[in-house]
């Protein structure tokens, strides 16, 4: 338990898919005035250096954000290059705002992405949970720099359990109850898969109108294969719309170890614009990150 450290993986293809989806979803929800409760059940450390020891060891950003930025730079240099899809541009703008010197040296994790988009006037509030002893300390130190007051609260608690206390969310100043929840476990233990399903089942009972985002790895493991199927069934049983976006970057043809090569984002009660936005974004991101064989992307929906 707790061998997973997100710093080794920050900015990889899975983060690219996850964070494009997160930004596009939240930006749409924020078109309405009412304040949002934003929950990140598995928060990580919050902020990562892409030139630090961890990321160099993993080097996963090379096949993720670095490759994406490099490919887009090359495309932009060509005459007649088209503007980027809105969801992709919004994600890149967010990354750029953390790297004012130009080069991407810092990668924001989900807590910092949420904070970047937080609307103080609307009284959005962020609730973060992180269990790892070191990462929860790093997260606390990183969040302390934000001077965010009570708009952010964090705890070294089990995100699955603590989520229950937060739903339904309190009413905002406009009287509406609104929440977006990101469930992003490391799946280092098999029990994370049934815990995600059980948590979604519980969330849909406690607060059926919330927007729920679940990241999952696409790997040769029965539990991983079953999870999106189970989430579809739970959404359909509750008569809630869903969307399932997947990105597979393919396997190196030279046979070198490629690590995780595919993942998905399952969204329950997605904004109605998300399907088109993700299709447009992945039509650029998919080919930009593709390598070797077996690369693909898809946006499936109810
Ligand atoms: N959401 C982060 C992001 O997008 O930047 C990345 C999170 S990482 C994939 C998963 C994190 O969950 C790890 O930092 C791990 O220590 C933490 N974790 C594992 N089990 C947990 C639990 N039951 N509750 C809260 N955090 C947990």
Image: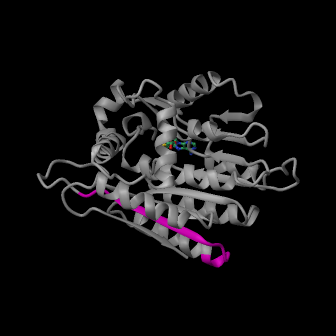
Q: Residue at x 46, y 38 (%)?
A: 2
What residue occupies the far front of the structure in this picture? 80
On screen, residue 4 versus residue 67, left or right, reads: right
Q: Quadrant of the C terminus?
A: bottom right
Q: Quadrant of the N terminus?
A: top left
Could you tell me if residue 130 is visible in this image?
no
Region in magenta? 236-250
| 246 shown above or below 127 | below
Residue 4 horizontal/vertical position (percent): 42, 39
Using the image as rendered, state which of residue 25 and residue 158 is in the foreground: 25
136 in magenta: no
Q: Residue at x 54, y 57 (%)?
A: 214
Using the image as rendered, state which of residue 158 and residue 265 is in the foreground: 265
Could you tell me if residue 57 is visible in this image?
yes
Residue 203 horizontal/vertical position (percent): 69, 61
| 152 shown above or below 254 | above
Using the image as rendered, state which of residue 12 and residue 83 is in the foreground: 83
238 in magenta: yes
On screen, residue 184 versus residue 35, left or right, reads: left
Q: Residue at x 45, y 30 (%)?
A: 48
* Count of numbered circles on the image: 0
Q: Residue at x 37, y 35 (%)?
A: 8
Model colouring = one colour
On screen, residue 153 versus residue 94, left or right, reads: right
What residue occupies the far left of the structure in this picture? 254
Residue 268 horizontal/vertical position (percent): 61, 65
Residue 218 horizontal/vertical position (percent): 37, 60
Using the image as rendered, state which of residue 53 and residue 11 is in the foreground: 11
């Amino acid at each position: 338990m707790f061998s997973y450290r997100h710093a080794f993986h920050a900015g990889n293809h899975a983060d690219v898919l996850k964070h494009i989806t997160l930004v596009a979803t939240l930006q749409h929800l924020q078109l309405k005035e009412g304040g949002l409760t934003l929950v990140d059940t598995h928060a990580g450390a919050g902020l990562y250096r892409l030139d630090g020891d961890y990321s160099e060891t993993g080097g996963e950003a090379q096949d993720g954000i670095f490759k994406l930025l490099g490919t887009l730079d090359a495309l932009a240099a060509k005459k007649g290059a088209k503007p980027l899809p809105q969801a992709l541009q919004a994600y890149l703008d967010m990354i750029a705002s953390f790297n004012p010197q130009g080069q991407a040296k810092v990668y924001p994790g989900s807590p910092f992405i949420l904070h970047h988009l937080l609307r103080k006037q609307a009284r959005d509030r962020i609730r973060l949970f992180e269990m790892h002893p070191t990462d929860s300390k790093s997260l606390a130190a990183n969040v302390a720099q934000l001077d965010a007051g009570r708009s952010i609260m964090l705890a070294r608690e089990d995100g699955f359990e603590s989520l229950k206390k937060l739903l339904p969310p309190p009413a905002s100043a406009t009287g509406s109850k609104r929440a977006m929840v990101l469930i992003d476990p490391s799946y280092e233990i098999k029990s994370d898969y049934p815990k995600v399903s059980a948590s979604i089942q519980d969330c849909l009972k406690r607060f059926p109108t919330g927007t729920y985002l679940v990241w999952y790895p696409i790997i040769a493991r029965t539990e991983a294969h079953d999870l999106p199927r189970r989430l579809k069934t739970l959404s359909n049983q509750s008569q809630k719309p869903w969307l399932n976006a997947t990105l597979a970057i393919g396997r190196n043809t030279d046979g070198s170890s490629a690590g995780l090569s595919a993942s998905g984002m399952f969204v329950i009660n997605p904004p109605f614009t998300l399907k088109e936005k993700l299709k447009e974004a992945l039509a650029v991101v998919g080919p930009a990150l593709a390598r070797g064989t077996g690369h693909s992307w898809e946006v499936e929906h109810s």
